[in-house]
Amino acid sequence: MNEFIMQSAVDQGLRKASGAFSTMIGMETKLSSQGWRQVGLNDMATLTGGIESMVVAVYVRFRGDIPGHAIFIFEPAVAEFLADAILGEVGEEHIRSSALCELGNVASSSILNEVADSTELAVYPSPPMIVTDMAGAILQAIAVSMAASDRQAVVLETTISIDDHPYSGHFLIVPDREDDGIRLGVLA
Amino acid sequence: MMSSFTAVGMGELHFSARKNLACYALGSCVACAFYARHQKLGAIAHVVLPGPSPATNAQPHRYATNAVDALVEGMQEREIDPRECEIFLVGGAQVLHLAPLLINGQHIGQRNVQAVKEQLHKHGMSHYREDVGGSEGRTMRLDLHCGRVSVCRAGKEEVVL
């Protein structure tokens, strides 16, 4: 797979997610990324401030031709800002959670759908779930579910700009089969 | 007082007479700790999966049965009666509800806890302190000097087990 095809699929996915975010938030919102890189699952936690650091993660399992896991990870303070942006500084905890969950879901499915369309591979995302816990414990669940102690993941360092205020997050894709990542040109 | 801890990673088993031991961010994994108070010697196995290890596995201590056996044998090699050790079990949570983490309808954390306990019973050890199950990640620390085991749940204060 040509890396440029993947790059344009990801860019298109980010644009679609930006449009959907703007509608959700009711303000000009942009989801952007400087590109992807490869990180081992075990090292991923260091990007978020250590394995014990608390994070908010929106998790989507996807099946089809290239099964895997997609996770959008935010620091709790960023998650609070984003929930505020969507709902105003109100709302019960579960409503704020589900708003954030939907935001992560929109981002994941926009990117995954574009990748699927441009590669003509089937990708079927499952309903999203949101969890707040130690980064290491969340990533461990994914490693254990694949019966692996470490796996290579594709990471997009993302920025959500709302009204010119940037909020950073990590978008992580872990293919079940490392070969799929290599075939798509996102893992070496 | 700050003290440093040696991290016991997934599938690892450490014996230590000097450096304190810790298992960070346990999800479905179970930390099984043995502490010999007279000798101030401790050991932690970071168990990932239930059952005995397949024969070809390069990391047998990932599996509950092998990990507990190795803890028992390691103590015996150091001329310590493992039945006189204090035993602690921490972890076995269900942080993410993922289908591949279910075995016969039970989540893998529950199965890990069960498997470790069964193997302990086989060695005649049925007394242990535990903080297991639930849905939150945990960090376990073992201070060798005083035998203090503390557990910190995600976003909560540390408690002594």
Image: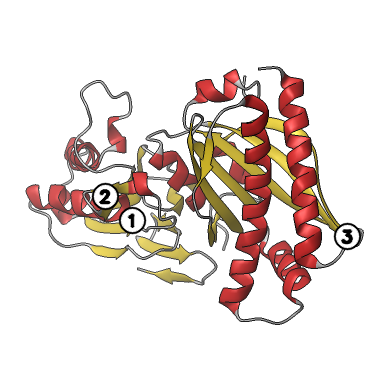
- Picture coordinates of residue B2, whole percent (x, y): 57, 59
Q: Give yes or no for contact between labels 1 and 2 (Cβ–Cβ under 8 Å).
A: yes
Cα–Cα span, label 1 and label 2: 6 Å
**Residue A28 disc label:** 3
Corner quadrant of residue B159: bottom left
In the shown orientation, is residue A7 left or right of residue B142?
A: right
- The quarter of the rendered structure image containing the N terminus of chain A is top right
For mark 1, give the secondary structure.
Answer: loop
Q: Which chain contains the residue that carries disc 1?
A: B
Which residue is at 24% across, 53% downward?
B105
Circle 3 residues within 10 Å: few <14, some 14–19, many ≥20: some
- The quarter of the rendered structure image containing the C terminus of chain A is top right
Q: Which chain contains the residue that carries disc 3?
A: A
Q: Which chain contains the residue that carries disc 2?
A: B
Q: In this view, does A143 lie above or below A49?
A: above
Cα–Cα span, label 1 and label 3: 43 Å
Circle 2 residues within 10 Å: few <14, some 14–19, many ≥20: many
Q: Of circles 3 and 2, which is in front?
A: 3
The reply to whether residue A54 is in sight is no
Look at mark 1 in the image and give the residue it sits on. B92
Q: Which amino acid does label 1 sit on?
A: Gly
Look at mark 2 in the image and give the residue it sits on. B112
- Picture coordinates of residue A136, whole percent (x, y): 52, 49
